[in-house]
Amino acid sequence: MKPDLKPDLATLWIRLKENEDIEARDQLIIHFAHLVKYVASRLAIHLSSLVELDELISYGIEGLIDAIEKFDHKRNIKFETYAITRIRGSMIDGLRSMDWIPVSLRQKSKELEKAYMNVEARLGRSASDAEVAEELGLNLDEFAVLLRDVAATTIISLDDFLPGEDGEQKKRMLDLLEDHNSISASEIVEFNEVKDLLAKAISRLPDKEKLVVYLYYYEGLTLKEIGATISLSESRISQLHTKAILRLRGSLSKKKNLVI
């Protein structure tokens, strides 16, 4: 029987946090490196040829290192859960800094979002595909192609930022929750307002779109896994996700200065 070569994680955390042992930190990075590939692969599926997997992994490693350095091993929190959120956030920060969405695609997405906002404001309910297509002067086949084209622009849309004060750097909601020293009274109010706005917007989504948002963002399933769960094709799930995010963008954009 081979000896168990798995590092004693508890000991590694103590060595790092109490003794600032760099070797222990490096061992933790190696041990949890698979999380970076997991998150990168999950994002890359939806970003197709727009972004290289290696670029996502590079950003993700930065997120993993940040997570290891900031993690409080004495708290009753599973590191994997904490790290995955940090890793994904780092990848998304990197994507935003790259300005990776082509201008033409960004414009299409904005036009589609505006169409959803206009129709739903006019009707006072969720708009159907036919109603939004008519608003855009498209038939249903053309509308389906447009949804497919803008799908990649919506995959990171719930990783929102709160505006900094007086031109300061914007902060992710996640950071405000975890870095208690950074939270001002105004930021707490801002975060709670945005969280409440998002919850209400999700509650107004059509049932299938609401389910996709829940399973993707809260349960961590991939679009393919969601499709298998509710017996729909992955392309259909992608379409539902895109429509849900476009509706949510419209609701959240009512919040002044919120970057989506």
Image: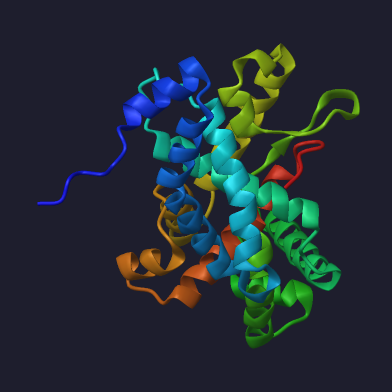
Write the residue at 45% across / 31% down.
24
Percent across and percent down for residue 140 are 63, 83
Write the residue at 49% across / 58% down.
37
Percent across and percent down for residue 188 are 65, 19
Write the residue at 43% across / 53% down.
34
**Position of 15 relative to 160 (above/below):** above
Tell whether 194 sits left or right of 71: right
Count every numbered label the image shows and give the total: 0
Percent across and percent down for residue 204 are 54, 48
Can you see residue 71?
yes
Tell which residue pokes out farthest to the left in this image.
Answer: 1
Tell which residue pokes out farthest to the right in this image.
Answer: 166
Task: Compare residues 8 and 140 and report the one nearer the observer.
Answer: 8
Determine which quarter of the picture holds residue 256: top right
Tell whether 181 sits left or right of 137: left
Write the residue at 31% across / 37% down.
7
Can you see residue 201?
no
Percent across and percent down for residue 143 are 67, 79
Task: Compare residues 111 and 41 and report the one nearer the observer.
Answer: 41
Task: Compare residues 259 and 85 and report the one nearer the observer.
Answer: 85
**Position of 258 relative to 106 (above/below):** above
**Position of 18 relative to 12 (above/below):** above
Tell whether 28 sits left or right of 54: left
The figure's colour scheme reads rainbow
